[in-house]
Image (cartoon, rainbow, N blue to C red):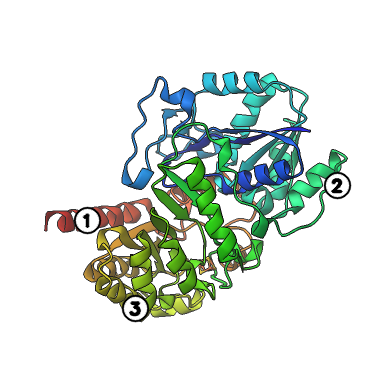
Amino acid sequence: MKFLIINPWIYDSAAYDFWLKPLGLLYISSILKKEGHEVHFIDLMYRHDEELEKYKNIKDRYYGTGKFISKEVKKPEIIQFIPRKFKKYGLPEELFEQKLKEIGKVDAILVGVTMTYWYYGAKKTIDFIRKIHNDTKIYLGGIYTNIYTEHAKKTFKDLNVKVLNGTGLIPIKNMLKELNYDLKEYNWFEELDPDYSVYNGKMPYAVITASIGCPYNCSYCVTHNMWKYNYRSKKNLIENIYNIKEKWPNLKNIVFFDDAFLLRRDLKELLKDLANIKVNYHLPNGIHAHRVNQEISDLLKNANFKTIKLGYETSDPNLQKNTGAKVTNADLINAVNCFKKSDLDLKDIGAYIISNLPGQKIDDIYNAIDFCFDLGIQANVNEFTPIPGTEDYKKMVENKQIQDNLDPLLLNNTFIPYWWDKGMTEEEISKIKLYLKKKRMEVKNE
Ligand code: SF4
C-alpha cells in the first residue's frame, strides 16, 4: 500500500524549533516500511526543507535550534478574548500543495498531533489536504487523540477523519486492520530506529529516545498513563546513532527526548559508548537530579553532553513531596556541584520551574528562580497546564476549579492565566517573566 504521513502546521501564539521532531511519526514510517509498504512523508515543521531553502535563508541558532517561518492568522472564536497574536508556523501552503501533488494518489494519509492544544493546526492541515484528497482515508493519532478522544472524534467528523488511539503499535495495527492488513506484534521500540531517511535537506540535529515512559507518578504529568517505562538496549541505540550519522555525516547534535534518561541500569556503560561518537548530546527534558553523582557527571562531560535540563518545578519542599517526590533542593545542589567539578559548561545547564501549579504561592517561583541563579544555572519557567487524566486535573475538576471537557485551545499554558481566576493572574506571570529576564541580564553583564 501507499501511505502518506504528515506532521501538521502548528497554530499557536508562540513556537520555536527547540529540537522539535515528530518522533512518533518517524517511528510509524519505519513500521510501515518494515511491512513493505511505500511511505511518503511531509514534515510541515521541517525548517531545512530543500525546496524551502531555495528561496528562504534559514538560520540556525543554539545547537541547531531556530525560528520557524510564521504568519499571523485570525484567532479561533473560543480564544478571541486572549490579547495575544495567533500565528501559523511551518512550510508555506504553496510548497505543501506542490508536495501533495507530486506524491499523488495514496491509499491512506496519517496525521499526528502531540500537544493537545495543537489540534487546531491539524484541523487546518487536514482542511487543506481535503482540497486535493477529498475521498482518501485520513487517520489522526498522537497524544491529543489519546487524551481527547471524544473531542477529536467530534472536531474531525466533518472532515471524515478516523481517530486512532492507543500507543505503540496499537493505533497502526487498528488502522491496518481496517485496510485489511494484519500487523503482527513485535518489540518495535527495540528493533526499529526512527526513520530519518524521510528528510531531504540539512540536519543540524536529530532527536532520538533511549527510553519511553517514566516510573514516577507526578501529579501534573501524563507520561506514566501512556507508557510503561522501558529502555532500548545499548547496542541498538548506539547503532541507531551510527545509522543517522551515516546518512548525515555532518550532523553535530543528538538530542535525547527521554523522560527518564538517567534511570537505566546500564547508564554508565551507555555513557562510555556514547563518548566514542563525536557529536554534542543534549538532554532537554528534565533529568532526575537525584541520579547525578560525580561519576555520572564526569561521564556526561566525557561523552560531550552540552544542554542538560534538570526537573525541579518548585522550591517548596511540601509541594515537591505532594506532586511526586522526584526531586529535593538537596538533589539539585548536589547535581550542580557535581557538574561544576566535572567542568561542564553551566551556561548550558538549567532547571525547569512550573508557575501556577495548584496550591503554589507566588513566592515559591521567585525562590526557585533565585535558587537556580545562586547555583549558577539557568532557570526555565513554564506555566502549568492541567492535562486530563493527571491527578492535578482530576482534583481541579472535583474541586470545581476548572470545568471538565474544556476546549484544549483554552488549556494552552500561555492562555490559562488570562481566564483561570483560581490561579495566578497574567500580571503576576508577566512580573515573574520580567524578573527572570532581569536576572539573566545581570548574569550576562557579570
Ligand atoms: S519524573 Fe518527569 S516524566 Fe516522570 S512522571 Fe514526573 S514529570 Fe513525568
45 and 374: which is toward the camera: 45
- Point 70% across, 36% down: residue: 156
Q: Amino acid at mark 3?
A: Gln
399 and 133: which is toward the camera: 133
Could you tell me residue 306's position as x and y percent? 34, 58
Picture quadrant where residue 197 is located: top right
Label disc, if present, on residue 440 of the rendered structure: 1
What residue did someone put label 2 on?
182
Could you tell me residue 436's position as x and y percent? 26, 57
Q: Is residue 410 left or right of residue 286?
A: right
Label disc, if present, on residue 294 of the rendered structure: 3
Query: The N terminus appears in which quarter of the rendering?
Result: top right
Mark 1 or 3 closer to N-term?
3
Residue 386 in view in this figure? no
Asked if labels 3 and 1 touch by Cβ distance under 8 angstroms, the answer is no
Asked if labels 3 and 2 touch by Cβ distance under 8 angstroms, the answer is no
SS under mark 3: helix
Q: Amino acid at mark 2?
A: Asp
Q: Amino acid at mark 1?
A: Arg
- Point 85% across, 44% down: residue: 177
Query: The C terminus appears in which quarter of the rendering?
Result: bottom left
SS under mark 1: helix
Q: Is residue 39 left or right of residue 390?
A: right
